[in-house]
Amino acid sequence: MTNTASIPAAESKLLSVENIEVIYDGSILAVADISLDVGRGQIVALLGANGAGKSTTLKAISGLVQADRARVSRGQIYFAGNNIVGSAPHILARAGIVQVLEGRHVFAHLTVEENLQSGAFLRRLSRRDLNADIEQIYGWFPRLKVKRKILAGLTSGGEQQMLAIARALLTRPELVLLDEPSMGLAPTIVQEIFEIISQLNRQKQMSFLIAEQNTNISLRHAHRAAVIDSGRVVLHGTADELLARGDLHQIYLGIK
């Protein structure tokens, strides 16, 4: 079931990506022409095949593209009305943008709760406020509460993905960028993760931009979506509009 009945108003735009181009190592074109936007309180799916440019687009928004020896060579990115092209990731995290990278990155030799505590480092909370935030996280991710004293490396793949997302939430973001959250996980766990995303969106009006290859689960939980092929947006619309199409996979493969 999609959220399209309650899509936030278009004028409440939080993120606007305008015709960006991204180049690696000064010469390798990774993204040619991407334009998209995320409204306040919206979930937007960024769909496409592996290598289409989804991850690069997210990293361009979060500033992490700089760590890959890449840069936004053309176009603009606005967050809450401010041009953020070239801004450092920690500055953007303080401003309200956080990215959860592909691959379930957690500190394997720290406990689940220690991983969560690390997520609040930038905010320098008091112990009381930190504990209150972590208890709220456990309310959204009850699996993590059960495993709070277990080393993160000993938890399941699904629990590690939940932990990576939960740790990002400790920054109290306005916009969460998720890169392939369903990758390698069982369908029941994927469904649970997306239901938590929808819950956060409804309860906290948190905005999400989710890069995914899993079309069905993404569109069932998103308000809007864009399809990327070869570093360009080739299709966009509401989730219901894209779900109604029968040619998304052909678009992924570049078949006309």
Image (spheres, rainbow, N blue to C red):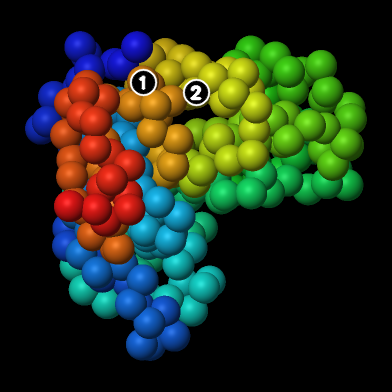
Quarter of the figure with the N terminus: top left
Which labelled disc corresponds to residue 187?
none
Residue at 82% x, 32% y is 155
Image vertical order of residue 59 relative to residue 205, above or below:
below
Give the residue at mark 2. Answer: 194
Residue closest to the eye, 42 or 132: 42
Residue at 57% x, 49% y is 102
- Residue ranking furthest to the left: 11
Task: Tell me residue 199's x, y (percent).
Answer: 46, 15
In contact (CB < 8 Å): disc 2 and disc 1: yes
Task: Tell me residue 145's x, y (percent).
Answer: 77, 18
Would you identify the image quadrant in which residue 164 lies?
A: top right
Tell me the amino acid under the disc marked 2: Phe
How far is mark 2 from mark 1, CA to CA?
9 Å
Q: Nearer the viewer, mark 2 or mark 1?
A: 1
Tell me the amino acid under the disc marked 1: Arg
Would you identify the image quadrant in which residue 11 lies?
A: top left
Which labelled disc corresponds to residue 220?
1
Image vertical order of residue 87 relative to residue 199, above or below:
below
